[in-house]
Image (cartoon, rainbow, N blue to C red):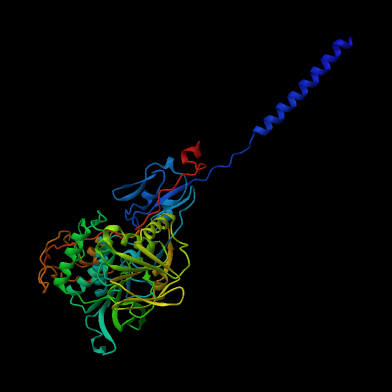
Amino acid sequence: MDPVIIGPLIAGGALALIIAFKVLLSGRKKDPGPQKKVRLLIHSINDDRCTGCDACVTVCPTDVLELQKNKSRVARFGDCIQCEQCANVCPTTALVMHHEGTEPPPLLVPDLDDYYQSNATPGLYLLGEAAGKPLVKNAVNLGRAAIEHALRSGLRPGALSGMNSPQLTCYDVIIVGSGPAGLSAALSCVQRKLSYVVVEKDAFVASTIARYPKGKKVMAEPYDVRCVGLLPVWDSTKEQAIGEWNRILSEVELNLKMKEVVEDIKRDQASFVIKTDKGTYRAQRVLVAIGTRGKPRRLNVPGEDLDFVQPLLDDPDKYTGRTILVVGGGDSAVEAAIALSAPELRNKVLLSYRGKAFNRVKAKNRQDLDLAEQQKRVLVLFGSNVAEFNRQGATLKLADGRMRPVPLQNAFVLIGGDPPVKWLESIGVRYVQKPHSYQRGATDQLVERLLGRQPENNRPGQAVSTELSSFFQAPAMPSLVGDRPVMAQRRERKEATIMVPKEAFLLHLPEKLKLDAEAQKVSDLRR
């Protein structure tokens, strides 16, 4: 055959083989094989623990969440970028995130019976937020339920009265904490003619609520639960609530011991020995209603118990034209110094920190503090320590070793707190794991299981006499057969009054996140 014809044929065949081989290889490269499924993080929300604090909604950078009937809800899951900030800021672990197809992480909860009594230490009750049942209406109901249950489970009024001595005071009931649960329990003790004392580490009752910002709403939540405790609950502002609360408590004249810290509680045969920083007590029953803020850390210097020294800042606007010392090196201390140094307050603020620099403070707080320093509204003293407090103010040991007396009108020691879990375990509260969906029953039903149907206590302005003749008219106490009361006839008590909101778990939320260029929404991942 003519070479002129054979040459092009051979070349064309070789080229066709090369092209076919490349196509085959490229086809194989494009075949990725089985795709690995993206494991999305999904939200799990426990309504029993959700307080409607709005923290998760505020921090979400893509507005995935919203409050519906004061509970957090996932409204736009397709916009979720899987950043988990909502779970990180949730103060009650009501909201957690977990991979699709897996179980949400379990809750660590106190091991309590149906009446919030420690299963490990009978006679010791844990109430309110520390018991995993937040919101003030719940706390008020639980305060009453605990006293009624104690009376039906062996509490005998006056049984320890013969053991009183100058060194040891005996009570039927010791109540630790003067929040809604503690005050409600105290009023129930008054009604039932039990000897009791309320021991409070702060300088005033209901300190968490009293320290709410001016005008903050305190809501009567949860709305599907009736207030059947003796401390009234209704929607109000902080000022209305605290004013009415104080009016009622002043007429009742509760037995309160303020600025006294409970250090230890031990079961001693059929009763408890309670040691505080100021004395020792014995009681048949102990009710612990301390919230979850924990025990504020102390400097342990002379004069720290003086009235002008406080472990928390309530309303900065109450302090004007004063010289104020703030002690601490975290965000809470820096934020307090910034708030107290606002130009319109005309305060002179000293910020004492033993470290050489603020290593744990958010960048925005650091910027605001720098501005306050430049304007000479705040003086920061690094490497300094408080040597003592006295009636004139404080003595500071400066970084160079000099001792410097400083005249003050107020001081705030904001050096953090110790979470209460370890302390609660040390006094006889055992902790166990439960599924994240674990919820306790409604607290109004718990009270009415003991007492029968009760009128709702949700209107302010009811008159209260010091004799408690009408407001605290005690209903007849039915006997318990198991969990079912045998109802007895009793006189209807008049409905009374007062407030309650949810705990201010998160006073300072992180700023909105800046979206990473690589961040993908769930809707993009699914496509």
Who's the residue at 28% across and 48% down the image? 69
Quadrant of residue 184 within the rendered picture:
bottom left
Closer to the camera in the image, 133 or 386: 386
Q: Is residue 469 left or right of residue 200?
A: left
Task: Tell me if residue 64 can be seen.
Answer: yes
Who's the residue at 85% across and 10% down the image? 5
Closer to the camera in the image, 186 or 104: 186
Please state the horizontal and vertical placement of residue 427, each as a whole percent of the image. Answer: 38, 76
Closer to the camera in the image, 355 or 306: 355
Quadrant of residue 398 within the rendered picture:
bottom left
Closer to the camera in the image, 403 or 179: 403
Image height check: is 491 above or below 282?
A: above
**Quadrant of the frame with the N terminus:** top right
Q: What is the tally of numbered marks visible in this picture?
A: 0
Who's the residue at 47% across and 53% down the image? 103
Please state the horizontal and vertical placement of residue 109, each as a whole percent of the image. Answer: 40, 64
